[in-house]
Image (spheres, rainbow, N blue to C red):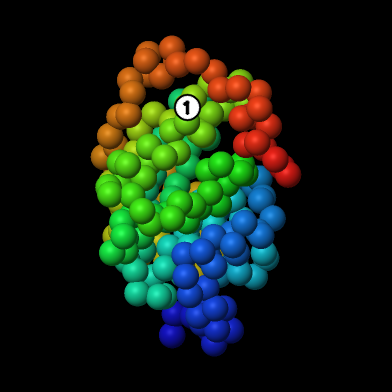
Amino acid sequence: MLWTPDERRFLRSLNSPQKIQDYLDGLVYNTQDDALSPRYVMMTGDGHCLEGCLLAAAALEFHGHPPLLVDLQAIDDDHHVLAVFKTKTGWGSVSKSNTTLLAGRRPFYYSVKELVMSYFDFYFNLDKKLSLYAYSNPINLNRYNHWNWRTSDDNLVELGMAFSDEKHFEILDAGMLKKQSPVSEKLKKACFLDF
């Protein structure tokens, strides 16, 4: 059996994208370089972007969605991943972030690109420069089952790095992105509220 009875009970309780997002929002954000499986996130109560995304994908899968993620690439900033899902009303996402503005989105987006663009104005570095550069199509994590990503005892950091090898679609070329005006100080403060 993949999940223990306690893990199954816990995953059963995360029976909506909003409940998954609420759980991720309550995790302590860790800054470690390692990446642990959803099993360890459930055990420790902390996680970073990749760890939160893997847990969200596992919870969505438990409730009948394919385990999909979208890889976001940035210039002069950290990359980010989203666990994505589709309903009758559109695409949505669940996400763990060290900012307040890169969390999940409700499923009202017509396409993955439209969903990704909802992050564009809120994805910036500490110098207030917009940094979201490119995104992938949804990646089905079942293609990476050889990593045992749901319950592995191993460090999964290389799994996260492997997503960079997927085809990505440029939003703006690097030169155009660097020419964009910086965001306001007020937006920056909102982004790091409570962090």
Q: From the top left corner, tell me how far across and down residue 19 is, in percent.
A: 54, 67
Q: Is residue 82 visible?
A: yes
Res. 92 image quadrant: bottom left
Q: Residue at x 49, y 24 (%)?
A: 130
With respect to residue 186, does 57 lie above or below? below
With respect to residue 94, does 118 lie above or below? above
Element type where label 1 sits in the image = loop
Kindly give the residue lying farthest to the right in the view shown: 194
In the image, taking residue 126 as reference, residue 107 lies left or right, namely left
Q: Residue at x 43, y 85 (%)?
A: 1
Under mark 1, the amino acid is: Ser
Q: Residue at x 67, y 50 (%)?
A: 30
Q: Is residue 58 visible?
A: no
Callout count: 1
**Residue nearest the viewer, comparing 154 with 62:** 62
With respect to residue 180, does 151 lie above or below? below
Q: Residue at x 29, y 37 (%)?
A: 168
In the image, taking residue 101 as reference, residue 29 lies left or right, namely right
Q: Quadrant of the C terminus?
A: top right
Q: From the top left corner, tell me how far across and down residue 86 is, in percent.
A: 32, 60
Res. 134 image quadrant: top left
With respect to residue 173, does 70 lie above or below? below
Which residue carries the number 1 mark? 131
**Residue nearest the viewer, comparing 122 with 45:** 122
Q: From the top left corner, tell me how far across and down residue 76 is, in percent.
A: 51, 24
In the image, taking residue 22 as reference, residue 119 lies left or right, namely left
**Residue nearest the viewer, comparing 147 with 105:** 105
Neighbourhood count class around disc 1 (C-alpha, 10 Å): few under 14, some 14–19, many 20 upward: many
Q: From the top left corner, tell me how far across and down residue 90 is, in percent.
A: 31, 56
